[in-house]
Amino acid sequence: MFEGKIKKPPLVGHQLAFLTIVGFWLFFVLIFSLRYAVADFPSQWEFAQTRAIVSLFGIGITWLLYLVLRQFDRRKLSLRISVAFVAAIPAAIAIAAINFYFFSQYQPSDMFDDPNLARQIKDIQEQIGITPVQEVMEQAISRYFFLIAWASLYLAIGYAREVREAERVASRFAQAAQNAELRSLRYQVNPHFLFNTLNSLSSLIIKGQNERAEAMVQNLASFYRTSLSSDPLEDVTLAEEVELQQRYLEIEAIRYPRRLLTRFDIPDELSGMIVPALILQPLVENAIKHGVSHSDRPVTIEISARRTESHVEISVADDAAPHNGEANGESNGIGLSNVRDRLEARFGTKARLTASADAEGGFLATIYLPKAK
């Protein structure tokens, strides 16, 4: 059984809509009251009372207009604007008719200190030739623009909420895409490492070197248990990351017992620094693949870290002969590209990777991470 489509909440709630309507009509009453006060119009108190009654009717009619506009929430903005312009017409006429009734028909003489003043005003209107319909329509025009002003505010509030909702949805999609990208990059563990390790393991078993084979199996199991079981989006301390690389290098040391040497230089003050998990793995693999495996002499791989004024630098260096593969900082090799992509996805422009080869031999890759605040 399929659930119905989840109905989204209204763009503007009843409370906010009511407050805007009351606010508009209070402003309307204030402006007209000031206008008549400045003109020193007679019977101002009586007019104010009648104006308050008309405004209460106006609030009710504007509320009905709100209920109409509410039915078109989340439709195209052009449709909502069209509905507002059309629906405001009968609303404006209704308000103008009520205004005409209370000010011109419902005991108008009671609103003046001079009973003859109301009759004089009516006589002037008859001489000019203004009919009741014309008077209502003239009032309706001004009330129409008043209602359009309120409807514009209502539509603006609703549209602003739609924009905020769209921004939140876009932000969630962007975060989901970024997380997917980080997971994808995180799981790009070099398959050659596993294949080569299994081949080396097979060779050790055939040669009867059971202790070395057992050590390799244990290190391999420990490495993959740590690297694949954790959440790709989780961070680790620098000490944990370096420890994982030590396990990896111990496995490779069984493959290259006479060619691989290691050195670690991690200050205690940086051991607890948080870094993306396995961020050093591609750099260490790169040193093994392009340095140790192609060398006919011992190669030292060094992992070090230091703090500068603006960044924390984490480096992976080797002293092998010039690499055949990723030989310069602009290399597009898979290992370096993976690290660059992960840094960009995680930190944007606040982090970067540089890589360079020494003409006399050796390769240095350095990650620059922003210092924790």
Image (spheres, rainbow, N blue to C red):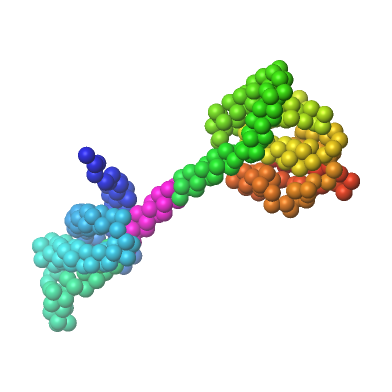
Q: Position of residue 211 (x, y in %)?
A: 71, 17
Numbered label tally: 0
The answer to whether residue 38 of the structure is visible from this angle is yes
Span highlighted in magenta in the image: 149-169
Q: Is residue 131 above or below residue 7?
A: below
Q: Residue at x 13, y 74 (%)?
A: 133
Q: Is residue 264 above or below residue 211?
A: below
Which image quarter holds the C terminus?
top right
- Left or right of residue 16: residue 220: right
Q: Position of residue 217 (x, y in %)?
A: 64, 23
The quarter of the picture where residue 6 lies is: top left
The quarter of the picture where residue 102 lies is: bottom left
**Between 37 and 373, which is closer to the camera in this rendering?**
373
- Left or right of residue 230: residue 144: left
Assign the magenta stretch its main secondary structure. Answer: helix
Q: Is residue 321 above or below residue 25?
A: above
**Among all residues in the image, which is located at the extreme front?**
206
Which image quarter holds the N terminus?
top left
The answer to whether residue 241 of the structure is visible from this angle is no
Q: Position of residue 179 (x, y in %)?
A: 52, 41
**Between 63 and 133, which is closer to the camera in this rendering?**
63
Q: Residue at x 15, y 66 (%)?
A: 97
Q: Residue at x 21, y 73 (%)?
A: 138
The answer to whether residue 256 is magenta is no
Q: Position of residue 261 (x, y in %)?
A: 81, 29
The quarter of the picture where residue 365 lies is: top right
Q: Residue at x 17, y 71 (%)?
A: 136
**Between 281 and 95, which is closer to the camera in this rendering?**
281
